[in-house]
Amino acid sequence: MHIAEEHDRTLAPMRCFPPAFVWGTATAAFQIEGATAEDGRTDSIWDTFCRTPGAVAGGDTGDVAADHYHRMPEDVALMRSLGLGGYRFSVAWPRVLRPDGAVNQRGLDFYRRLVDRLLDSGITPFVTLYHWDLPQHLEDRGGWTSRDTAFRFAEYAQTVHAALGDRVLHWTTLNEPYCAALLGYGAGVHAPGRRDPRAAAAAAHHLLLGHGLTTQAIRAADGGARVAITFNLYPVDPADPDDPVDRDAARRVDGLQNRLWLDAVLRGRYPDDVRADLARFGFDEHVRPADLATLAAPVDALGVNYYSGYRVTGHGGPDRRRAEWIGAEHVRPVYRGLPRTAMGWEVQPEGLTRVLLRVHTEYPVLPLYVTENGAAYDDDPAEDGTTHDVERRDYLRGHLTAVHDAIERGVDVRGYFCWSLLDNFEWAEGYAKRFGIVRVDFDTLARTPKLSGLWYSRVARANALPGG
Ligand code: FCB
């Protein structure tokens, strides 16, 4: 395969990363596995959501996805050939537990094989226990609006830990509980597709309760486990810093997107202003006094997912998508004229430095991992199958520079996981939005590293960014 080498500018000094820095990629079960009805897997809320007319672009489903369930050895070999030292993946709950609560060994065996193969390849597994694929039978009993789901989650997590805990050190309970609660139950743009702010408020607390119960259970079983949670964090700025309406809009969005989750897990309390904003949706009714100590069960690290920042105004009108910002009905994002990705997200690398610095300075100091960062662009592969995705390469370079800036300012960042290894099922956007550093041809399922993947591989091997 031939891809024209870009000329790295070599005049400026290399930016070296700390010695044990983990260079990896991230994926999620539903986005890549396919095989949704194989080996005893049952439906998740995403299988159901995909069958809902109009819910997912193009009527796409996860039935085949990137066929990773069948091509896992090839995918691990690919990571190895790219010289990557870490892999963040998620376990599909409906693959490993049956609706009656019994363990589905065939499903669990897939993850045993994956972990074995990663370790044999010198790649450290980082396991995420929940990346949004709730078993449908639990949704039928209320899903995350039901307190019981938090306890079911901890049971499921213990099953996975019992199977993999002898070989897996790094555990993440939840990926982006914000999206699971607010997009899934508030805006209805993610599974299970509910548009009910009261349900979203309940789900937010029950997801965090599930995180706390799971953290306690894994720690009780395994004193050596390193347990984390991953949040999607954003810098949030007022459109007009002198306008009190815009400043209040920024406060509300910052509260919902960032502080609700960070304060709960790292300080053991919900912010008073967010509690007040959510009071009319019954948030407090779900919070029992003893819960706060559970939510704040000590974690060993924090995962940060970062794509873009927000500038917001409080002078907005109705907007379906922004139904996720419950308690902030007139708040809208204002675009700044920055370049945008195919998702429409503004490219704001310096926001990643700000987010990492904020967590480091405002919360108890913890090791941080950038557990997701990457970009969708409309790739246009050449006839020989190569993808010269200069924009994605530049996006990664800009954001890795931002991570390095944070490290130089004293933030303890231990690793970076590019989203994503493969083009995959991008939730409500289906397969049209490609985030991979490796191209997947969805007709043949062939994998071909893109320019960005080859560039990332060189950075990972060098443990340094080229100068410039
Ligand atoms: C994050 C999700 C991940 C992927 C990226 C683009 O919010 O965690 O699964 O869809 O966005």
Image: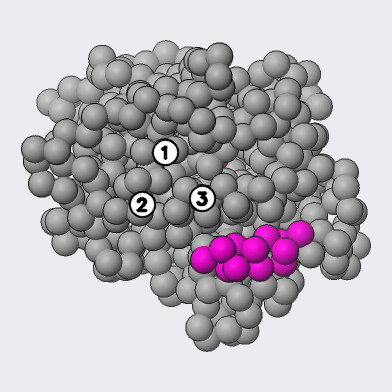
The disc labelled 2 sits on which kind of residue? Answer: Ala
Label 2 beta carbon within 8 A of ligand 1: no
Q: What residue range appears in magenta?
A: 110-122
Q: Amino acid at mark 1?
A: Leu
- Image point 40% across, 33% down: which residue? 452
The disc placed on residue 164 is none
Q: How far apart are the alpha carbons under marks 2 and 3? A: 12 Å
Left or right, residue 173 beside residue 347: right
Residue 258: percent from left, percent from top: 37, 47
Quadrant assignment for the C terminus = top left
Viewer-proximal residue, 215 or 341? Answer: 341
* The quadrant where residue 104 appears: bottom right
**Residue corresponding to mark 2:** 460
Which residue is located at x 14 percent, y 56 percent? 408
Ligand 1 within 8 Å of disc 1? The answer is no
The residue carrying mark 1 is: 454
Give the residue at the far front of this rendering.
Answer: 1
Q: Where residue 82 appears, x then y in whole percent?
A: 47, 48
N-terminal of the pair, mark 2 or mark 1, is 1
Tell me whether circle 2 and circle 1 mark residues in contact (CB < 8 Å).
no
Q: Residue at x 8, y 38 (%)?
A: 11
Task: Report helix, strand or loop for mark 1.
Answer: helix
Q: Main secondary structure of the magenta part?
A: helix
Q: Is residue 358 left or right of residue 103?
A: left
Q: Is residue 45 magenta?
A: no
